[in-house]
Image (cartoon, rainbow, N blue to C red):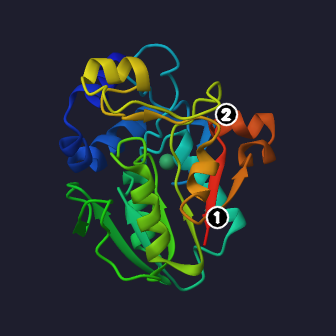
Amino acid sequence: MRKLIRFLINKVPRIYLIRFSYAFSWVVAIFYKGNKYYCPVCEGHFRKFLPYGYTDKNSDNRLCPNCLSLERHRLVWLYLKNETDFFTKPMKMLHIAPEQPFYKRFKSIKTLDYVTADLESPLAEYHFDIHEIPFDDNTFDFVMCNHVLEHVEDEFKATKEIYRVLKPGGFAILQVPVNNKLKETYEDKTITDPKEREKHFGQYDHVRMHGLDYPKRLEKSGFTVDSIDYVHKFSKEDIERMRLPENELLYIARK
Ligand SMILES: [Zn+2]
């Protein structure tokens, strides 16, 4: 079963996975019913989470069998739920590259004017290049754009665009994978081969590997950035029970 799931997640094109995930996860949820783990996004209880990832190393017990959330989704969700009025206050949000576990749930928030965008995902309502966001200045109260900036050609241009479309007083969540051993973000535009990119930046389609200077990079676009070690507000038991990412900071960028 585990091998089959790993195979499906890694080999089936994402588009089919998204399309069939509701049926797929319903079946899997039955196999994974239990009490040891808890997903705060869908509020499901499980015996175990699903494996996720390209290698055997650290790929176990990560993906929610019901809503397909990963550690990082659960952390962002908890922050929004516990530390903001996102779920109750009327606001206009731009969600770039909307994550599957969030999409349906955000859409159902009555007070949220929810706009989704992506280069190509069929989930999204608008399709555009993040280097040129086709919205007026000061349009959104909240922009979420996770795991995108490590893929874009010109990160500065993209973050300036996000800053531009945010209203003064608005905020953005812009998570990227950060290598805590790197003081400065590593990028090299001459590395274009997918194999080389994987070797240098950690994934075949990444164009940089972010380091500890990531918040400083965002600040260059005008943001004020809070780097929050939110995961450690939870007990060791809860971190394990919800399978939260122990080394991930949240970057809350404010205009
Ligand atoms: Zn879940």
Q: Mark 2 is on which residue type? A: Asn
Q: Which residue is depicted at the point 55% across and 31% down?
A: 47
CA gap, disc 2 and disc 1: 20 Å
Q: Is residue 62 left or right of residue 5?
A: right
* Circle 2 or circle 1, nearest the eye: 2
- The answer to the question of whether label 2 and label 1 lie on touching residues, with beta carbons closer than 8 A, is no
Q: Mark 1 is on which residue type? A: Lys
Q: Residues within 10 Å of mark 1 (few under 14, many from 20)?
A: some
Q: Is residue 243 left or right of residue 174?
A: right
- Label 2 lies in ligand 1 vicinity (Cβ under 8 Å): no
Which residue is label 2 attached to? Answer: 247
Q: Which residue is depicted at the point 37% across and 58% down?
A: 98
User: Residue 31 or 246: which is nearer the viewer?
Assistant: 246
User: Residue 18 or 155: which is nearer the viewer?
Assistant: 155
Which residue is label 1 attached to? Answer: 81
Q: Is residue 53 left or right of residue 238?
A: left
Label 1: element kind:
helix
User: Residue 91 or 153: which is nearer the viewer?
Assistant: 153
State the quadrant of the N terminus: top left
State the quadrant of the C terminus: bottom right
Label 2: element kind:
loop
> Which corner quadrant of the image does residue 168 belong to?
bottom right
Q: Position of residue 194 (x, y in %)?
A: 26, 24
Q: Which residue is depicted at the point 78% across and 45% down?
A: 234
Q: Is residue 64 left or right of residue 233?
A: left
Q: Is residue 14 visible?
A: yes
Q: Position of residue 81 (x, y in %)?
A: 64, 64
> Is tag 2's residue or tag 1's residue first in the polypeptide sequence?
1
Q: Which residue is depicted at the point 72% across and 44% down?
A: 231
Q: Please say if 174 is above or below 82.
A: above
